[in-house]
Amino acid sequence: MQTFEQFAKKHRVELTYIKRANRTDSVTAWDKGASHYNCTLHHEDGSMTFWYSMGSAHKTGPKVGDVLQSLALDASSAEESFEDWCANCGYDTDSRKAFATYEACVATHRELQRLLGARLAGELLYQTSEDGE
């Protein structure tokens, strides 16, 4: 196993971001102290742009390892059916908000595979962890 930071370094995945006052896409309500970023992951000749937010306790910008971990968590849950995803995450299958969140996870999975390719996306999701163990 490797950490998300190690994965980024090994495969030359880089992160750039711009801090924004608020999100324009969010289905989640954020507290006033939260920080919002328009992020772009870069790998080889491709890129992936997305929103990333952090709670008020975070005082610095996002780090590539933390962002990859968050994306990997979302993407790995997209391999479940919507019904299983709802059961595992505590959502109601009759919720439009839940379905929109699930669809965002599916889109993240698709975008990671496009950016990294199937092999590296699989390595990110299943051979990488927060502590490398």
Image: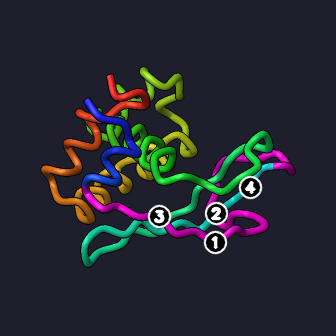
Name the residue that disc number 1 marks: 18
Element under disc 1: strand
Residue 22 located within the stretch drawn in magenta:
yes
Tags 2 and 1 touching, CB below 8 Å:
yes
| Residue at mark 4 to residue at mark 2: CA–CA distance | 7 Å
Mark 4 residue type? Ser
Q: What predominant SS class does the magenta segment belong to?
A: loop
Answer left or right for 80 relative to 23.
left
Real-space Cα separation, disc 4 to disc 3, in angstroms? 16 Å
The numbered disc on residue 80 is none
Q: Are marks 1 and 3 in contact (CB under 8 Å)?
A: no
- Disc 3 and disc 2: Cα gap in Å? 11 Å
Counting from the top left corner in percent of width and height, residue 105 is at: 41, 47
Mark 2 highlights which residue? 37
Which residue occupies the foreground of this view, 119 or 104? 119
Verify whether residue 46 appears in magenta: no
- The three-letter amino acid code for the residue at tag 2 is Tyr
Task: Give SS at disc 3.
Answer: strand
- Are the residues tagged 4 and 2 within 8 Å (C-beta)? yes
Q: Is residue 109 left or right of residue 60?
A: left
Task: Find out whether the residues at labels 1 and 4 contact each other: C-beta distance under 8 Å.
Answer: no
Q: Looking at numbered disc 1 in the image, what kind of residue is underneath it? A: Ile
Query: Type of residue at label 3?
Result: Leu
The region drawn magenta spans 11-33
Residue 35's tag is 4
Q: Nearer the viewer, mark 3 or mark 2?
A: 3
Q: If you read the primary sequence from the N terminus, does the residue marked by circle 1 or circle 4 appear first?
A: 1
Mark 3, residue position: 15
